[in-house]
Image: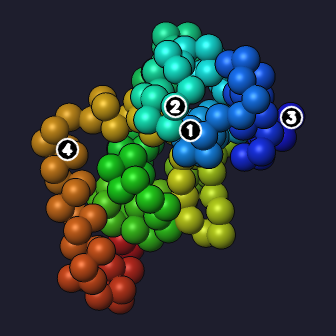
Amino acid sequence: LRPLTGAETSAVAAHWLGVTSIPPELARRLLRASGGLPGALTELVRALPSATAQTPLVIPVSLRDDALVRIEALPPSERRILEAIAIADRDLDALRVAWLVDEPEAEVRGQLDHLRDEGMIAEEGGFWCYRDGIVGELVRGHTRPVRRLLLARRLAAVAEDLLPSEALAEACR
């Protein structure tokens, strides 16, 4: 099954909520959280208290528990990669992921491929992101504060180009 589009997400959500349409912002958040997966979307919509643009998304226990089991089953190095992508809250290329987790790029590329094969993340144009926002939110919420701070500082160094790209490449070899 292919992921739903934004329009399909909006239509399915409106149907489940018994309304003719939902706010575009809510549809965007539902699409990001569900990854366009119909089952996840249905669970998220059923848990919605209302259909306003500001309505907070509630991750149903069934989805949360399933995702947490899958995350906890991963090797520690792959969980660190998930943490880096979650804290960045944006797409990262493999080189920056390797620098953030302080591992050789070749090893990180293999781990990224495995995480993609497990359905945790996706690659789009050489950049890595969460396939669905549920996993990202759970990882972000379960990352220790000290680890979040460390990753945020390393990310800031990359974002501000404090580390030239050649030095970045060298550091990841």
Q: CA distance from mark 2 to mark 1?
A: 7 Å
Query: Considering the numbered disc 2 on the image, is that residue within a helix, a strand or a loop?
Result: loop
Picture disc at residue 103? none
Residue 147 coordinates in the image, percent (x, y): 20, 44
Within-10-Å neighbours for mark 2: few <14, some 14–19, many 20+: some
Mark 1 or mark 2, which is nearer the start of the sequence? 1
Number of callouts in the render? 4
The mark found on residue 147 in the picture is: 4
Label number found at residue 26: 1
If you read the primary sequence from the N terminus, does the residue marked by circle 1 or circle 4 appear first?
1
Label 4 sits on a secondary structure element that is: helix
Q: Is residue 55 above or below residue 98?
A: above
Q: Nearer the viewer, residue 109 or 162?
A: 162
Label 2, label 4: how far apart the Cα atoms are: 34 Å
Q: Amino acid at mark 3?
A: Leu
The reply to whether discs 2 and 1 touch (Cβ–Cβ < 8 Å) is yes
Q: Quadrant of the N terminus?
A: top right
Residue 84 appearing in the image:
no
Residue hosting label 3 = 1
Q: Residues within 10 Å of mark 4 (few under 14, many from 20)?
A: some
Disc 1 marks a residue whose amino acid type is Leu
Q: Position of residue 36 (x, y in %)?
A: 71, 38
Query: What residue do we see at 38% from left, 80% from top?
Result: 169
